[in-house]
Image (cartoon, grey):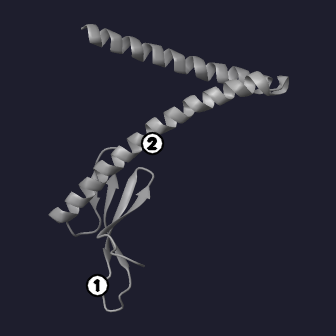
Amino acid sequence: MAGELPEFYFRIRENGAAVFRVDTENRQRRIEMDQIAVVNVRNGEIKPHGDRPLSDPEKAAITQWLSDRRSLLAQRDIDDIHRAVDYLNITTQWVQSKATDENLDDITDTLLLAMHDLRTVLVRKKADRILKGRG
């Protein structure tokens, strides 16, 4: 491997990550990774792995990773929503130009219910924001 390895490696899991300390300072010069903690992105919980408590620099590195990860996930969420708008537009074009009667029979009710649900939530949220702005 070229370049400097990071001091910590974060193995992404469904709700966070397993945190490893990366070590190359051994006789064989092999990369060793010792798990030091588990992080939960949703609730911010950091659990040390094993009996050893985390040092202040380890806690700081994990806290920084947690902040960066939450920011990345939030950015991905909004990107997904922008993609959903694109998909709705592409779907509209498909319905108008390419969909067969069988295609439409297959998706119309499900799509209409999903769109109705989305519209209902969007209208309610917008009304809440307008009311807060007046209060």
Dot 2 or dot 1: first in sequence order is 1
How crowded is the residue under tag 2: few (<14 C-alpha within 10 Å), some, or many (20+)? Answer: few
Q: Which mark is residue 25?
A: 1
Q: Is residue 42 left or right of 107 when viewed as pictured? A: left
Q: Amino acid at mark 1?
A: Glu
Residue 9: x and y in percent read: 35, 66
Let me know if residue 54 appears in the view.
no
Q: Amino acid at mark 2?
A: Arg
Say if 26 sits above or below 120 in the image: below
Q: Which mark is residue 112?
A: none
Give the Cα separation between the discs numbered 2 and 1.
37 Å
| Outermost residue, bottom side | 27
Residue 53: x and y in percent read: 19, 66
Let me know if residue 106 appears in the view.
yes
- Going 38% across and 46% down the picture, which residue do you hit? 72
Residue 73: x and y in percent read: 40, 44
Pick the residue in front: 97 or 5: 97
How crowded is the residue under tag 1: few (<14 C-alpha within 10 Å), some, or many (20+)? Answer: few
Say if 90 sits above or below 8 in the image: above
Label 1 secondary element: loop
Quadrant housing residue 70: top left
Quadrant including the C terminus: top left
Q: What residue is pinned by disc 2?
A: 76
Label 2 secondary element: helix
Say if 125 sits above or below 4 in the image: above
- Going 32% across and 82% down the picture, which residue do you hit? 24
- Going 40% across and 15% down the picture, which residue do you hit? 126
Residue 54: x and y in percent read: 20, 64
Q: Is residue 74 left or right of 83 when viewed as pictured? A: left
